[in-house]
């Protein structure tokens, strides 16, 4: 299959490009800079230069492909509403490029905010108004009515592995900078996790096999206590571990504090059954113990 991948130069995107090429697929990756184009080409993909802010380019990229994986996202957390609006326009443009073909469009989403207080399953619909990113998943699902095969991949909040620069690396950097690895309150809240290479395998299996409208959970571990994550970071960095009250979390962690204090547990039973997907790579605590977050 010829697959068009946005975010091909990113953390999950580059693992996905490698996974696709190793499985015999042909990939065109979107790249917005010379540096990103170099990274994508080095993975063995063709490069389409441009941005996720350009609907015409996205439409053309999708129309020229047999499937689309949309992983590009602007992670400037000071401009979350703008990022979600751009994402929505990108999904609409990519969907229009595939209209009437029955070809897959997989978009990235997350598990936060869907059904607090329970283990989220693939049967739980995306969260509604007030959650613009979740609303984008609803928009993608409606593309099934226009002859597209939309797929939603809800990633665990930490997609980890060697070279990770996401949430776990931010927590590790804060611990290093402050000399203390912290958790909020009793640290009994949970974070699901998945290894980046397992996530990439799931994405490939999904575009190969999953029917229109499938919600998939890229989750290998249902929930790890935040206290256990903080303790593993403390051991890896050889810094003390302590609890911060809710009121001091923002000051210690900055914007990531609110997320680290969130309780989210998610199952991937249905995804594993549907795709025959079996996470095979190290767990988050194993990656932390292996020292991948020390540098
Ligand atoms: N990593 C996680 O733990 C996690 C968890 C839940 C959900 N997700 C979601 O999964 C998807 C992939 O995440 P990731 O961790 O791989 O993110 P990432 O490493 O930050 O990669 C983002 C990608 O988007 C590209 N991009 C950003 N703005 C762009 C623009 N205006 N035009 C073109 N390309 C642009 C980046 O290009 P450059 O290389 O040029 O910067 C990069 O390739 C995202 O939607 C993310 O929100 C990730």
Image: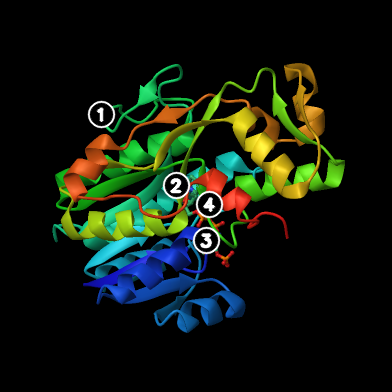
The circle drawn on residue 160 is 4
- The image shows residue 72, relative to residue 18, as above or below, that is above
Quadrant of the snapshot with the N terminus: bottom left
Mark 4 C-beta closer than 8 Å to ligand 1 = yes
Q: Secondary structure at mark 1?
A: loop
> Is ligand 1 within 8 Å of the beta carbon of the residue shown at mark 1?
no
In the rendered image, residue 42, in percent from the top left (x then y), is placed at 49, 83
Q: CA distance from mark 1 to mark 4?
A: 25 Å
Mark 3 CB within 8 Å of ligand 1: yes
Q: Nearer the viewer, mark 2 or mark 3?
A: 2
User: Between residues 52 and 207, which one lies in front from this camera angle?
Assistant: 207
Q: Secondary structure at mark 2?
A: strand
Element class at badge 3: helix
Q: Earlier in the sequence, mark 3 or mark 4?
A: 3
Which of the labelled discs sits on residue 194, or is there none? 2
Q: CA distance from mark 2 to mark 3?
A: 13 Å
Cβ–Cβ below 8 Å for labels 2 and 3?
Answer: no
Q: Are marks 1 and 4 in contact (CB under 8 Å)?
A: no
> Do the residues under discs 3 and 4 have CB atoms within 8 angstroms?
no
Left or right relative to 288: residue 118: left
* Residue 76 visible to the viewer: no
Q: Can you say whether 66 is above or below 35 in the image?
A: above
Name the residue nearer the viewer: 144 or 7: 7
Residue on which disc 3 sits: 11
**Cα distance, mark 1 to mark 2?**
19 Å
At a point 45% along the width and 41% down the height, the residue shown is 156
Residue where numbered disc 1 is placed: 123
């Amino acid at each position: 299959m010829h697959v068009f991948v946005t975010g091909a130069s990113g953390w999950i995107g580059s693992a996905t490009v490698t996974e696709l090429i190793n499985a015999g697929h042909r990939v065109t990756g979107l790249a917005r800079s010379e540096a990103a184009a170099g990274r994508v080409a080095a993975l063995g993909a063709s490069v389409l230069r441009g941005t996720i802010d350009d609907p015409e380019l996205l439409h053309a990229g999708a129309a020229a492909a047999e499937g689309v994986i949309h992983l590009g996202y602007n992670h400037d957390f000071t401009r979350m509403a703008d990022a979600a609006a751009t994402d929505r326009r990108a999904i609409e443009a990519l969907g229009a490029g595939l209209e009437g073909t029955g070809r897959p469009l997989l978009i990235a989403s997350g598990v936060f905010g869907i059904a607090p207080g329970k283990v989220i399953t693939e049967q739980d619909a995306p969260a509604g108004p007030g959650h613009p990113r979740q609303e984008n998943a609803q928009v993608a699902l409606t593309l099934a009515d226009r002859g597209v095969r939309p797929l939603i991949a809800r990633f665990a909040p930490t997609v980890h592995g060697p070279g990770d620069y996401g949430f776990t690396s931010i927590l590790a950097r804060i611990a290093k900078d402050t000399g203390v690895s912290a958790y909020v309150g009793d640290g009994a809240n949970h974070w699901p996790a998945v290894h980046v290479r397992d996530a990439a395998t799931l994405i490939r299996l999904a575009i190969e096999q999953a029917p229109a409208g499938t919600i998939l959970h890229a989750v290998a571990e249902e929930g790890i206590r935040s206290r256990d994550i903080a303790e593993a970071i403390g051991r890896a960095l050889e810094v003390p571990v302590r609890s911060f009250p809710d009121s001091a979390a923002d000051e210690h962690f900055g914007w990531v504090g609110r997320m680290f204090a969130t309780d989210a547990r998610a199952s991937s039973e249905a995804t594993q059954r549907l795709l025959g997907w079996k996470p095979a790579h190290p767990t988050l605590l194993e990656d932390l113990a292996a020292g991948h977050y020390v540098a």
